Image (spheres, rainbow, N blue to C red):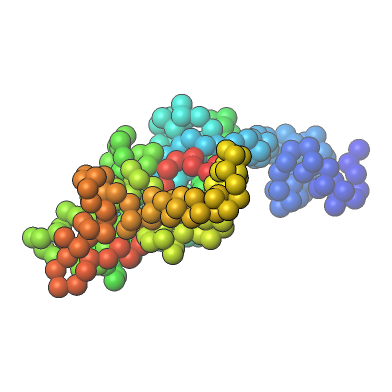
Amino acid sequence: MPNKNPLENIKKLRDMTGVGFKDCKLALDETKGDIEKSIEFLRKKGIAKASKKMSRTASEGLALVKEDKGQISLIEINSETDFVAKNQDFINFCKELSEINFKTQGDLKKLNEIKMMNGILVKDNLVNLIAKIGEKITIRRANFFNNTEGTNFFYVHSAIEKGIGKIISIVKLSEISKGKNEDIGNKVAMHIAASNPLAIDKDGIDKNIVNKELEIIKAEIVNSGKPADMAEKISKGKIQKFLNDNSLLNQIWIMDPKKKVSDILKENSSDKILQVLDFVRYKVGEGV
């Protein structure tokens, strides 16, 4: 017999299925408070099955880039296995999301509320796809580069289709001169994909990352038997190397080990020094 306490029923149904408050309330309303029928209702909609899978780790998937009139969008959609990342239903879903992401300019909150070609909201199509495929799928992150204050370039590493891959980088450069340095942006984007800088210059690297690295360096030196005063001196040199290796302008240019990225930018400058205004790099699953 159904429990007459609606809030208690919702809590019980949530605990049993992992489904959110709103969907549980809807299911209970539809079934007049019957827990078993509510579970069946949710399963038929694919919601219960999908919610249970959301505790798993999804570190595979695809990154997709779209460019139009100098504007570029980027989105990453994750799956649990690379097998699913090759599934045509998953790929088609990702392609449509990439188109929507361009229109919503990298705003995932807006993206989730957009109706897809089948007339169903993105967030609901996601639930249905999870239920159909049987793996956790997440729309992880998105970005958008407008076409003001510079020129945008992108690079897809080992593209499986046009604009789809596992590593994608975008860079915005200033002062591009026709006929002189039109291809430099593509080369810088390729460098970013290969070298994974953390920031444009040393000052831009997160201080927490620097402090953590310094802590590790000092501990390694002390553990090797060096005295503390010597460890302090050695660590300063090592942290400088870390900053250079991880800041784009100070990195060794992948196409010429005798030059830094900053040297290449100067060589490709006209009246003003060519500058990196912004960049982003997505590697599927990185940090998950």
The correct choice, above or below, for 267 with respect to 131 in the image is below
The correct choice, above or below, for 1 with respect to 203 in the image is above
Left or right of residue 43, residue 102 in this image: left
Residue 185 at x, y = what percent?
Answer: 23, 55
Left or right of residue 178, residue 224 in this image: right
**Along the line of sight, which residue is nearer the eye, 62 or 123?**
62
**Along the line of sight, which residue is nearer the eye, 43 or 140?**
140
Direction left: furthest residue: 179
Residue 233 at x, y = what percent?
Answer: 51, 54
Residue 249 at least partly seen: yes
Q: Name the quadrant of the N terminus.
A: top right
Q: Name the quadrant of the C terminus.
A: top right
Q: Residue at 57%, 32% (x, y): give it.
A: 135
Quadrant assignment, res 267: bottom left
Direction top: furthest residue: 83
Residue 6 at x, y = what percent?
Answer: 85, 51
Q: Residue at 15%, 73% (x, y): give it.
A: 271
Q: Residue at 91%, 48% (x, y): give it.
A: 4
Residue 109 at x, y = what percent?
Answer: 53, 59
